[in-house]
Amino acid sequence: MNTNLHLAIILGTFSAGFLGWSVTRTILPKIKISPLTKPSSGPLVMNSSQKILLAGILLCLLVTLFGDFFLGFFLLVLFLMGCLVYQKGPTWMHERELKKRQGKMSSVFPQALGMAVQALKTGQTVPQVLEYLSHESPSPLKDELFLVCAEMDLGSSAEQAISKMAERFPDFSEFHQFLESYKISRQTGANLTHLLQVLMEGMEEKNRLLRKMEAMTAQARLSGLMIGLLPFFLGFVFFLMDPTLIIPLFTEKIGWAILLLAAILETIGFAWIRQLLRLEV
């Protein structure tokens, strides 16, 4: 019993220290709340968000010190994660949807660029080409180009309307290159058709390299997925063989500490593998 207690204390202390370091370095700086306001006369005043955050942390610390250490520790982690999700959740969802939409547009942009090159060769102007693409391009690029044409109808120039679309999608590198090519042709008198032709060929080569790299790293991604799922699979197998080996992980405090440590290590491994397999061209 003493050995188990000592092991639980060691694992709990290590997990608390590591998670505390992670919280102070990564989670707490991301929780953006308005700063303390100082009236013209009087002490500093906290707003409601700061009061809730401070009260929750103090309550969890009191439970940790005077009650159950593991219960207070888990309450503190859950409270901090809840604050982070509440503050950053909408932003994360918006960024995720924006990246998803941007990825779809990046995949169809070379096709739309080829249509633009063919339209320019027939003698059409850039506003006419944008109007043509707003009807013939694949979705969702068609919807964004329709907004560009709507802004031009309201009096904006083609360059201004395209620049506004580039501001809405700051990571859409292909469209930014198209915008820079258009600006260069207007400032220097260069042949826009030739510039877009070279740009389209570069995009096609980039997409070819990306597909080749994805095929080459497919085995590594599958290996990482299998390694990540292996602990859960082995735990399920051990539970079927002898449930008494697994049940203490969920009923004993030392089991909670082991599960917490395992979750932290699994998260670090998943983030590490994902970073190693990130493709950049």
Image (cartoon, rainbow, N blue to C red):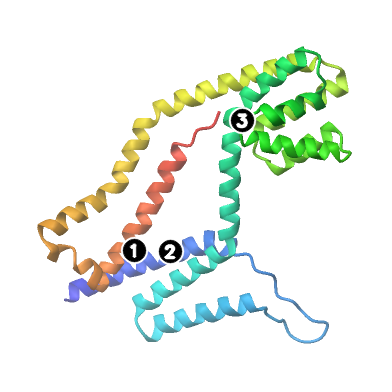
| Picture layout, residue 257 above or below residue 102 | below
Answer with mark 1 or mark 2, whichever residue precedes in sequence: 2
Could you classify mark 1 by the number of other residues whose Cα lies within 10 Å: few (under 14), some (14-19), or many (20 or more)?
A: some
Q: Is residue 271 above or below residue 58?
A: above
Residue at left 50%, top 68%? 82
Q: Which residue is mark 1?
A: 260
The residue that label 2 is drawn on is 19
Q: Which corner quadrant of the image does residue 49 belong to?
A: bottom right
Q: Could you tell me how many numbered marks the image carries?
A: 3
Q: Quadrant of the C terminus?
A: top right
Is residue 135 depicted above or below 58 in this figure? above
Q: Is residue 177 left or right of residue 231?
A: right
Of helix, strand and loop, which one carries label 2? helix
Cα–Cα gap, marks 1 and 2: 10 Å
Would you call the spot at circle 3 few (<14 residues within 10 Å), some (14-19), or many (20 or more)? some
Q: Amino acid at mark 2?
A: Leu
Q: Quadrant of the N terminus?
A: bottom left
Taking the spot 62% from the left edge, 24% from the top edge, the residue there is 110
At 73% from the left edge and 36% from the top edge, which residue is drawn?
146
Q: Mark 3 vs mark 1: which is more N-terminal?
A: 3
Q: Are marks 1 and 2 in contact (CB under 8 Å)?
A: yes
Q: Secondary structure at mark 1?
A: helix
Front one among 4 and 72: 72
Q: Nearer the viewer, residue 280 or 196?
A: 196
* Quarter residue 152 falls in: top right
Give how far across and how far down residue 78 sits, in percent.
44, 70
What is the x, y in percent for residue 91?
60, 56
Q: What residue does disc 3 label?
A: 138
SS for dot 3: loop
Q: Amino acid at mark 1?
A: Leu
Which x, y percent locates residue 99? 58, 43
